[in-house]
Image: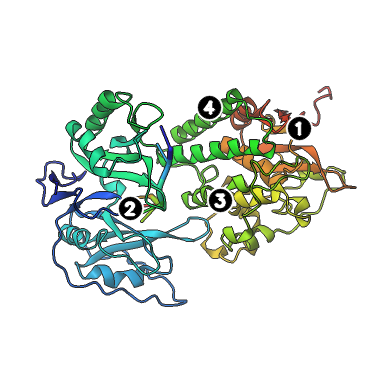
DNA sequence: TTCTATT
């Protein structure tokens, strides 16, 4: 059995501190499961963990720092993962208290929905308690209802970056194990984590994550290994690059969704150039956002909370039913298997909770009516592709749509002050911020329109014009941003963007007084 | 060929 001893993860605050425990590589011979292979500290014996019993309907009791509850200067903040979503702070407390006095324990909640994220941060008063807890708990026990073992490890915030030393390894062959990957990367530095990505069946997806202890090590692995060889059975040479950040993953998912739009009419492929231009604009936009945000996190108005992104990613848009306009063969479109059941139930009441805003008497309901309702006007018809698409987008809707419905949301008191989306009754952006979009797919409603433009900035309003008689989309609409740069980015990326057989026309909305001399 | 989550 192979055993590789490694030094402990370096801590940001004490880079010089000698390793206080060693990490052991669990290699082949050890029963490898589909779990990521981690470099686990030696196990110590601790009392059998008694799982806390969730208490129904009780309020969370956050444990906050207080006097007499001082923490070590070098205390380690731990990230706790794989927590059942029905466990709150007070439920978790007993589990962790056995390793020492807790300084702070916070279950992470979605900022907007208050939804339990299934993870928490934990800081003990004593550094040593954290180490004990990690050794005793990490990957050692699976909490009720969870399919993976609990995670107890230093929070990302405890190590600088974290991402700048984590590599994505692609184009592995599916037979390669964690150990194979480990061996491959071992020469370049200290490997803290090595995970082969696997599907539910445990089969390798042909890629892996390798985390080095330093950026430099990671960089050197890239320099030497990337493209250096082609694994047997792989379609191209080995890919070694820094892993995506969450933001990049978000962008990737959006790109994938965009790609899926082409499925509305499989006969026409999305031209790569257009796709690429959208992707590129997304990247630029995201980069701009990141640069403008000191914390490095996306502005709430633009960011998709990770949990919701996850929801999007979990939905199979490929299962879209044929649209009424463009029936497709069974070839590329399996029967609609997506149902509302695939969407967290919280979504529906929120999205449906909108009340109509009365149309203006000027005969222009569109731009005047912001988020009149969260549903496309055709939603009462039999299921359409857009219905399903809407479900796919529900996570985003839940986020974006929630603001106008503040008084209707069941979790209203957990909502923070709504960000700029809530310029409440503002319907049209400043000049240069309002776009006219033509050649929309018939199935697109306000929401789909909004989703398509959200990546470029804060969408103040989105409206697809409907034919009053037929209740069908007139295939054009308006989108308003809160700033001209977003509008320009959207034009750059989306004008000429092909969806099905059509190409979008995206241009600035003509100002009302455009033709009027001043 | 990008993971279960990181205030």
To which residue does mark 4 refer? A280
Q: Which is closer to the viewer, label 3 or label 1?
A: 3
Cα separation between marks 3 and 1: 26 Å
Q: Which structural element holds mark 3?
A: loop
Can you give x and y, in whole percent of width and height, for residue A443 in the image? 74, 43
Q: Which is closer to the viewer, label 4 or label 2?
A: 2
Cα separation between marks 4 and 3: 24 Å
Q: Chain of mark 4?
A: A
Cα separation between marks 4 and 2: 35 Å
To which residue does mark 3 refer? A315
* Dot 4 or dot 1, earlier in sequence: 4
Q: Which mark is residue A439?
A: 1
Q: Are marks 4 and 1 on the same chain?
A: yes
**Dot 1 crowding, Cα within 10 Å, few <14, some 14–19, many 20+:** some
Q: Chain of mark 1?
A: A
Q: Chain of mark 2?
A: A
Q: Which is closer to the viewer, label 2 or label 1?
A: 2
Q: Chain of mark 3?
A: A
Marks 3,2: beta carbons within 8 A: no
| Visible residue check, residue A460 | no
* Dot 4 or dot 3, earlier in sequence: 4
């Amino acid at each position: 059995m192979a055993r590789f001893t490694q030094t402990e993860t370096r801590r940001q605050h004490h880079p010089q501190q000698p390793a206080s425990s060693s990490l052991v590589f669990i290699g082949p011979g050890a029963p490898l499961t589909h779990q990521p292979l981690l470099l686990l500290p030696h196990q110590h014996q601790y009392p059998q963990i008694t799982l806390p019993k969730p208490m129904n309907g009780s309020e969370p009791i956050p444990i906050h720092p207080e006097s007499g509850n001082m923490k070590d200067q070098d205390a380690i903040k731990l990230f706790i993962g794989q927590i059942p979503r029905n466990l709150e702070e007070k439920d978790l407390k007993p589990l962790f208290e056995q390793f020492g006095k807790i300084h702070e324990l916070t279950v992470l909640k979605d900022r907007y929905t208050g939804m339990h994220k299934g993870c928490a941060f934990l800081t003990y008063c004593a550094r040593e308690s954290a180490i004990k807890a990690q050794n005793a708990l990490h990957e050692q026990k699976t909490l009720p209802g969870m399919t993976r073992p609990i995670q107890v490890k230093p929070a990302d915030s405890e190590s600088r970056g974290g991402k700048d030393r984590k590599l994505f390894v692609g184009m592995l062959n599916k037979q390669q194990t964690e150990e194979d990957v480990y061996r491959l990367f071992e020469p370049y530095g200290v490997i803290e984590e090595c995970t082969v990505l696997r599907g539910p069946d445990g089969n390798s997806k042909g890629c892996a994550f390798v985390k080095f202890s330093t950026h430099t090590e990671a960089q050197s692995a890239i320099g030497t290994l990337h493209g250096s060889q082609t694994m047997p059975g792989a379609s191209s040479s080995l890919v070694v690059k820094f892993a995506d950040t969450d933001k990049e993953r978000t962008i990737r998912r959006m790109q994938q969704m965009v790609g899926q739009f082409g499925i509305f009419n499989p006969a026409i492929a999305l031209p790569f150039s257009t796709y690429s231009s959208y992707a590129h604009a997304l990247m630029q936009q995201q980069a701009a956002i990141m640069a403008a945000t000191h914390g490095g996190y996306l502005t709430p108005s633009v960011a998709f909370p990770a949990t919701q992104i996850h929801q999007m990613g979990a939905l199979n848009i490929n299962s879209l039913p044929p649209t009424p306009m463009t029936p497709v063969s069974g070839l590329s479109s399996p029967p609609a298997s997506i149902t509302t059941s695939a969407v967290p139930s919280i979504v529906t009441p929120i999205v449906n909770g909108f009340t109509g805003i009365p149309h203006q008497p000027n005969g222009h309901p569109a731009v005047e009516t912001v988020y009149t309702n969260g549903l496309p006007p055709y939603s009462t018809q039999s299921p359409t592709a857009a219905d399903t698409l809407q479900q796919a987008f529900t996570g985003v809707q839940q986020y974006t749509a929630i603001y106008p419905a503040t008084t209707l949301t069941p979790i209203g008191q957990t909502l923070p002050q709504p960000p700029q989306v809530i310029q409440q009754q503002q319907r049209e952006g400043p000049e240069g911020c309002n776009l006219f979009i033509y050649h929309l797919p018939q199935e697109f409603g306000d929401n789909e329109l909004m989703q398509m433009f959200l990546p470029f900035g804060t969408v103040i309003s989105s409206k697809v014009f409907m034919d009053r008689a037929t209740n069908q989309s007139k295939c054009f609409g308006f989108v308003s941003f809160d700033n001209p740069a977003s509008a320009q980015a959207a034009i750059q990326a989306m004008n000429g963007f092909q969806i099905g057989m059509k190409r979008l026309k995206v241009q600035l909305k003509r100002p009302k007084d455009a033709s009027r001399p001043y």
